[in-house]
Each structure stands twice: as structure tokens, then as C-alpha cells.
Image (cartoon, coloured by chain):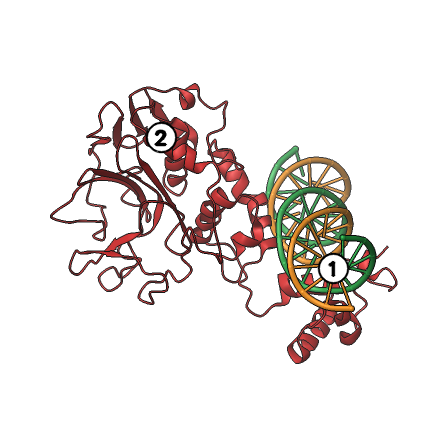
Chain colours: A red, B orange, C green
DNA sequence: AATCTCTTCAACCGCTGGGCT
DNA sequence: CAGCCCAGCGGTTGAAGAGAT
């Protein structure tokens, strides 16, 4: 039985032969696809238009990128999926040359299993409920540590002044030169997953600025991967970011990465010019940035919502309430996915 | 070598929404 | 407004290949 769209025709189904591919390619490169339902007849194929369209989009298009997904692509998929869910077509738009079908297959066959192995729910990206009772336990002081490293930091919610205190046992030699620095702002840095060998260490920093405290996690690439001295693209590779104006007035922002989108209120995306150290407001369409796809939260063309993430972040950094472990789990643990942390057993929380 | 099991991924199916009449 | 057509999307299927027994 053929498709309903072409039930009157005698159509072939199943795998495409090289001859069929050749016919389709020749037709589309010569005439364009036009109306897909007319393509089979014009191209001399015993297929339905829907099948032709799918074959072209997913396999024959010249701009397709074949081969294995890179680590960067994999990270992008996870980051965007965390916000958008199973919207494969939207996710694929962030991966030039990749199709929604390809992304979906890669997710189902590879990433999903990897997340589960990490103890993460692939749907929510949070810790699986039965992994640890600690994940829902709340207290004022917490320590996160990676068991096979020396990195620890303490989150102290008992005071408004010091949101995060850090135990910088781990080496700061891995700190990329592009990290925020300024004479007027105090920054504290710590690697969540310190590993000199690791190419993309994840850091957290907090900064005190006037009466605001900004707490940011950053997944950064090392300087040998980017020419940090000549480009300004290095500062906005955020995993997440929040700004606390006061205990009662919290503004929230979330970033996917520097190539994609950001969302939130109250915090304009800024970057520091590595030449003069001055903070600059990020300009959409600024050709000096490779961030031409950046979307503002009120951008009419492409609005991204962060589902329940907003609420989680608010809870997490409301110093008048208990600290939210779910946020920490969902934010920091994924940052370690590409590090030397291979399973949830290597990560733990002490309360 | 044969058989079974698992994994991958191309292709299909059913549904939705937009545009047109 | 209803009905139709079409493109596009996400879930699912199943053939083919890889690996295990």
C-alpha cells in the first residue's frame, strides 16, 4: 500500500538504488524540486513525492555533512536538547549539514545511553531519582567534589555576601587567559572538573559587582583551540548564568553557547575585550563575533523558552530559601559529561 | 561456520499547520 | 468557514551489518 498522498500511483518502497538516486539528483539539480508531489513523475521515479523529498533532504542534498558527530556537535545537541526537548528539526538548525533525522538517530542510539550511564534522565537532564537520596536533600552548605580529583567548592546559602566560596585546591594553571578579569571586579574561579589533559575544562566563577552577585558556569576551550588574542569569541561559552540583584529581586538568564541563543531578563550579555579589559555589550549581528545566530529573548523571529528552568534557577539562588540541588545537578553534572568523569559514581555531593 | 542478539540508521507512517480556493 | 493539498515534523519500523555465543 502506498502513501495516502499517492495511493493512486504504483510506488516503490524501501531502500533507494543508486540509479534512483542518480535520477533524483539529476532532476533536482536541473529543475529544482518545485512541488514534491510532481517530482517522481518528472524525474521518472516510481516513488511518491514524500519519499523523494525525504531522500533528498536526508541523504542526497549536496550540503550535507557526512560522518561521525564531533564532540562539539554532541555537546551542542545535549545543550539545545536540554532547553528544547525532542524538537529535532530545531536542534538540527544548530548543526550545519546535519538533518533532524540524523540528530534524532544519534540521540536515540548514542547520547541517550550516554546520559543514562551518567545517571541522568535524558528527558529532563536531571539526575535520575533513584540514584542518590542526596539529590533532593537540602541544607545551607554543600560541597561538590569529583572523587578522583582535588577540586571542591562550597556553596554557602547562609549569607547574602558570599554566595559561593571555593576551595581552590586544584591547579589554576589550566585557567584560560580569556577568563573575565578586571581591576574593579573580584572574580573567583574554580574548575569543576580539573583535568590538565582535558581540552574543555568547566569552570565556575562568581563576581561581586556593586550590590550584585553573578554566578556563572563556563565551559571553556583552551587557548590552543582558539586564537584568543585576536578574537573576542571566547567569553560567551556559557552553560548557564544567573544574576542576583538582591535577595528579593532575582533576574535570570540562561545561555546555551556562544553560537546559539540566550534567554532571560535583567542581564544583558556582555563580554570583556581581551585587549583593553573593558566590558562591552554584545551586539546582535556584530560581525566581529561568530554569534550571528544569537537570539534575544524578545526576538520576534525566534523566541526560545526555558521551560521550568527559570523556576529552578530562581529557587537555586534565592538566598532566603533552601538551595536547590536539582539546579546544581542539572547544571553542573552535564558540564562534566565531556570530562574525565565517566559515571555518576565519580560524582557525589556531601551535605 | 552457523546462529542469535544487538545496534544503527534509512525510510516510512501518521499527524499538524499553513496556504489556497 | 470548510475542505483540500502540501511541506514539515517526530515517532516508529525494519533491513542490514556487527558482534557475541
Q: Locate residue A69 relative to residue A212 in the image: left or right.
A: right
- Residue A29 in the image: x percent, y percent? 64, 77
The residue that mark 1 highlights is A15
In the rendered view, tell whether residue B20 sits above or below residue A270.
below
Neighbour tally class for label 2: few under 14, some 14-19, many 20 plus, Cα within 10 Å: some
- Residue C19 in the image: x percent, y percent? 60, 43
- Residue A235 in the image: x percent, y percent? 28, 53
In the rendered view, tell whether residue A188 sits above or below residue A290.
above
Q: Quadrant of the C terminus of chain A?
A: top left
Q: Quadrant of the N terminus of chain A?
A: bottom right
For marks 1 and 2, give the one nearer the viewer: 2
The quarter of the displayed image where residue A165 is located? top left
Q: Locate residue A273 relative to residue A92 in the image: left or right.
A: left
Judging from the image, mark 1 belongs to the subunit labelled: A
Q: Secondary structure at mark 1?
A: loop
Which residue sits at x=73%, y=61%? A51
The residue that mark 2 highlights is A316
The quarter of the displayed image where residue A326 is located? top left
Judging from the image, mark 2 belongs to the subunit labelled: A
The quarter of the displayed image where residue A207 is located? top left
Q: Residue furthest bottom?
A: A30
Which residue sits at x=53%, y=55%? A92
Q: Secondary structure at mark 2?
A: helix
Can residue A188 be seen here?
no
N-term mark: 1 or 2 = 1
Can residue A22 be seen here?
yes
Which of A121 and A339 lies nearest the eye of the viewer? A121
Neighbour tally class for label 1: few under 14, some 14-19, many 20 plus, Cα within 10 Å: few
Amino acid at each position: 500500500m502506498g502513501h495516502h498522498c499517492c495511493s493512486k500511483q504504483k510506488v516503490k518502497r524501501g531502500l533507494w538504488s543508486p540509479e534512483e538516486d542518480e535520477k533524483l539528483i539529476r532532476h533536482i539539480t536541473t529543475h529544482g524540486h518545485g512541488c514534491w508531489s510532481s517530482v517522481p513523475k518528472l524525474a521518472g521515479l516510481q516513488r511518491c513525492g514524500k519519499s523523494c523529498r525525504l531522500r533528498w533532504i536526508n541523504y542526497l542534498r549536496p550540503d550535507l555533512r557526512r560522518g561521525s558527530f564531533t564532540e562539539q556537535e554532541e555537546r551542542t545537541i545535549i545543550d539545545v536538547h536540554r532547553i528544547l526537548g525532542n524538537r529535532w528539526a530545531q536542534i538540527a538548525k544548530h548543526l550545519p549539514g546535519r538533518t533532524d533525522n540524523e540528530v534524532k538517530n544519534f540521540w536515540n542510539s548514542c547520547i541517550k545511553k550516554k546520559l543514562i550511564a551518567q545517571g541522568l534522565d535524558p528527558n529532563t537532564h536531571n539526575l535520575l531519582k533513584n540514584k542518590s537520596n542526596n539529590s533532593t536533600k537540602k541544607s545551607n552548605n554543600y560541597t561538590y567534589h569529583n572523587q578522583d580529583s582535588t577540586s571542591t567548592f562550597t556553596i554557602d546559602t547562609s549569607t547574602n555576601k558570599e554566595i559561593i566560596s571555593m576551595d581552590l585546591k586544584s591547579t589554576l594553571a589550566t585557567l584560560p587567559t580569556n577568563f573575565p578579569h578586571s581591576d574593579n571586579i573580584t572574580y573567583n574561579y574554580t574548575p569543576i572538573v580539573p583535568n590538565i589533559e582535558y581540552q574543555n575544562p568547566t569552570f565556575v566563577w562568581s563576581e561581586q559587582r556593586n550590590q550584585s552577585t553573578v554566578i556563572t558556569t563556563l565551559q571553556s576551550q583552551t587557548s590552543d583551540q582558539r586564537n584568543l588574542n585576536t578574537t573576542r569569541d571566547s567569553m560567551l561559552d556559557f552553560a548557564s548564568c544567573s544574576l542576583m540583584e538582591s535577595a528579593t529581586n532575582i533576574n535570570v538568564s540562561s545561555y546555551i553557547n556562544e553560537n546559539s541563543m540566550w534567554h532571560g531578563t535583567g542581564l544583558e550579555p556582555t563580554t570583556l575585550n581581551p585587549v583593553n579589559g573593558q566590558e562591552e555589550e554584545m551586539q546582535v549581528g556584530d560581525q566581529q563575533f561568530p554569534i550571528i545566530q544569537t537570539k534575544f529573548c524578545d526576538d520576534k523571529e525566534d523566541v526560545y523558552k526555558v521551560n521550568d528552568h527559570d523556576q529552578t534557577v530562581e529557587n537555586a539562588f534565592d538566598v532566603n530559601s533552601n538551595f536547590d540541588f536539582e539546579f546544581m545537578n542539572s547544571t553542573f553534572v552535564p558540564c562534566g559529561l565531556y570530562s574525565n568523569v565517566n559515571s555518576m559514581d565519580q560524582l557525589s555531593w556531601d551535605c
